Image (cartoon, coloured by chain):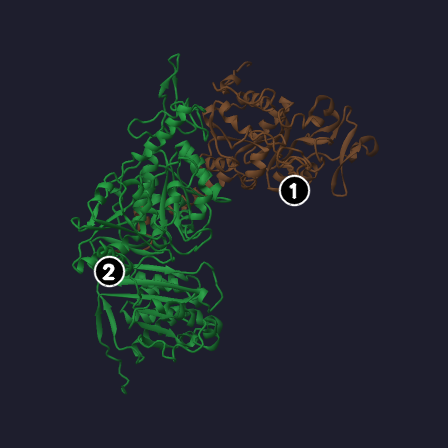
Chain colours: A brown, B green
Amino acid sequence: MTDISPRTEPGDWATDQEVRWCPGCGDYSILTAMRMLMPELEVDRENTVFISGIGCAARFPYYMNTYGMHGIHGRAPAIATGLAMARPDLDIWVIGGDGDMMSIGGNHLIHALRRNVNINILLFNNMIYGLTKGQFSPTSEVGKVTKSSPMGSLDAPFNPVSVALGAEAAFVARTHDMDRHHMMDMFRRAHAHKGASIVEVFQNCNVFNDGAWEGITKKQNRDANLISLEQGQPIRFGADGEFGVVVDNGAAKVVSVADVGVEALLIHDEGKADPSTAFMLSRLSRGPFEPTPIGVFRAVERIEYATSSTSQLAMAHDDQGSGDLAALLRSRGTWQV
Amino acid sequence: MTDTAPRELPLQELDEVIIRFAGDSGDGMQLTGDQFTSISAALGNDLATLPEFPAEIRAPQGTLAGVSAFQVRISDFAITTPGDAPTVLVAMNPAALKAQLHNVIQGGAIIVNTDAFNERNLEKAGYEDNPLDDGSLDGYRTYPVPMSQITRDAVAEHGVKPRDAERSKNFFALGLISWMYTRPVEPTMEFINTKFRGKELVIKANEAAFHAGYNFGETAELFESHYEIKPASLPSGEYTNVNGNTALSWGCVAAGQLARLPIFLGSYPITPASDILHDLSALKNFGVRTFQAEDEIAAAASAVGAAFGGALAFTTTSGPGVALKGESLGLAVSLELPLIVIDIQRGGPSTGLPTKPEQADLMMAMYGRHSESPMPIVAPRSPADCFNAAIEACRIALRYRTPVMLLSDGYIATSSEPWLLPDVDSLPDIGVDFHTGFNGTNEDGEGIFLPYLRDPETLARPWAIPGTPDLMHRIGGIEKEDGSGNISYDPENHQKMVDLRAAKIAAIDVPDAEISGDADATFCMLGWGSTWGAIDAAVERLQKNGKKVAHVHLTHLNPLPKNLGDVLSTFDRVICPEMNDGQLVKLVRAKYLLDVRPVNKMNGVPFTTAEIESAALQAMEAS
């Protein structure tokens, strides 16, 4: 009973197009993770669609041998919503960067999340505008010096996980481009979730914001600064699990386990109906210089949008029968001449 | 008269009447006008309506800003417009009188609700003296009727609260007008019972008010006669009364059936297009999926996504929305996917006049996207024609895989006319096949799919939808290599693609322009869209006065009919009435180097027949 070969190999998901990201870009490892995951998902290439907006990340569809659309800046969630409604049978992935999704497309992102359209959104967050060559983005830190902010950016950044939770997202996760297995885990979970799922991927732009996430994603910093959220487990981290997270006065807080005891630690529950704890966790870190959670923040069931739309169509069909055009034209009364 | 016997009033025959109901926006004037229209339609009159309402839902009561009006013209002959000037004005308050009086023909009848002419309302309307007493209505036949009081008295016995009682006064007015024009009572009783089902008190009150109005006409010694308008001799068949937005909605549904495709509508509410969203949302049993998006951009973008998935995709809006959709439409041009954009034009710029019509989005439809981004344009000429225009827009979109702009406007969107129902079995098949197999081979002789390999006849690219095995492909807004669709920045390829996109639209099969009126005239009027009715009526008048005049009316504005240049060049003088500052004129002049003269109007009110007649006479004299 071994060796039932998967329907596809990772190579089947690659196109003949040359990948044109800068050498060393974090996007390469995300692409690899995706191509490796696909055979595992037991899905067909023709039923898979990648939709993107504009930006470096948005070139992703060209490199996946599936159906795909490289759309316009920020609108990928809206394009994908139309496709998901018209074709609930498809597996739809939406790929975008922090500029695409949080800035010009922020409106579409939050509405896709609140509607719970069945799409998997991957937000490649590198905290900079790459394709336009290095302006500050809506996730850049205050004071960021760039070509468009020579004296430092004035804008307070968005925290994508907080935004997603505030937008009623039912599945919210976070991962980073230095850990392929964790990425694959998160993408797999996002795919399995029926409804809108969003995964923030900390991604390195080695040209315009190199090392922006190093404080937490570099191997030697992970123990101290990456908190892996595990369902049903106390939230703890550190080389020997010596640190943990508690809720204190309505906020999540990092503590020493020795000081508080294991039983005082917050048990991670991604399935909580109330998003408050997930939100607290999203606020734990102010930036990539202190302990930051990755993993699934929230995974709850909510009715999926296209499913609801389809059931309304079915109900209307049951109530009124199949649409009769001749009868429709007569529905407001007629007379004979 | 001193006896109490029922009065025997003479019944006078009229060939037409133009009635304008005017009151506060909360007075139910649209309902009253609609119902009078329905009764008259059922009697076989030809008719045309012109609703007119403020952009505010409930503007301050009693003010000029809050006046809502509904004009209906009924006739015993075929008509194409709701008429230039009402012959009868029903004014429910001083503001309505003040706002509408200037429209009424000299000698016309004015029926006023005298109870509303109190000091407060007169002041709100800006009257210093009561116009009912100061002679300002000399030259009109004025019929003062205490409508509020009689309505209150009539409904009192049903136990309606005094505060609510007056709300039935529009039915009093409807009853009175129904008596004046010998309309039957029964259809309105049925209407009241259907419309207000479950609200017994309201039904009783409205019925009582209607009868009170009807009886008042008969018994009050105020009217010298009542009138009859015989049925019009229209082509025989089954008719319904339809406004443009409803006809458009039905046309979209019909197109879905004729193309055997599910319908997707991405829309964001905007006046005066929202009714299409409402209508289509209620037709889910036809497989219509509607999506009320977060904004105009998402409405268009979602339609692009649905089209990619194989739906017949629409987005509906008005001018400001088209401005926001521009980038998505450019994407649709580049992706070469079928998509229908419906623009119910309204006054602008910016918010402009949301409830008033203009035809000033033509240039935006032609050129309102960056770079060379050609898009076909179709414009219906009348409310009922919206049905055909929707099907034609879909036919073009599907056959040529292109976004298509349908330009209606606030005038025909809300106006209604009798429509001889088509035989649905005789409507054209506009279906196209999805692409399902390879259309090329690679160097190794293996089958491949080339998403931009064009049909040599139509230049349309194959439409292969997700889910089709082996045809996985990526499309996008970046310039694509001809054939393969791969990203290409090659200079020659871009030139070729620009040329191909232009050639595809230029070669769309549109019917030749036809001349109505006198084909051998030396003078011609060129029109497009909703000016058809007024131009057509003006042609008829001019012909009656012995003038020779031709009329060419365009449904297709891009591409223009292939014969248009030849047709227009046979005339010594061509004028072009448009509700804009000369947009079609510019296109036609640029394309054909013909000296077509503009006749423009942009005051938010459709052209009257008289205005066009007079412009034509002036142009004829000048030449």
Q: Which residue is mark 1?
A: A274
Spatial CA distance of label 1 from label 2 is: 63 Å
Name the subunit of mark 2.
B
Name the subunit of mark 1.
A
B486 and A114: which one is in front? B486
**Is B508 left or right of A68, judged from the image as shown?**
left
Q: Are marks 1 and 2 on the same chain?
A: no
Residue B69 higher or lower than A268, as above or below: below
Residue B83 in view of the camera: yes
Tag 1: Cα neighbours inside 10 Å, few (<14), some, or many (≥20)? few
Position of residue B356 measured from the top left corner of the image (x, y, whole percent)? 40, 56
Residue A147 higher or lower than B44, as above or below: above
Residue in view at x 47 percent, y 60 percent: B57
Which quadrant of the rendered structure holds the N terminus of chain A?
top right
**Total label count?**
2
Residue in view at x 22 percent, y 73 percent: B11
**Is B16 left or right of A89, judged from the image as shown?**
left
Position of residue B185 measured from the top left corner of the image (x, y, whole percent)? 31, 68
Which secondary structure, mark 2? Answer: loop
The amino acid at mark 2 is Gly
Which of the 4 image quarters holds residue B452? top left
Which secondary structure, mark 1? Answer: loop
Residue B364 higher or lower than B373, as above or below: below
Q: Which residue is mark 2?
A: B44
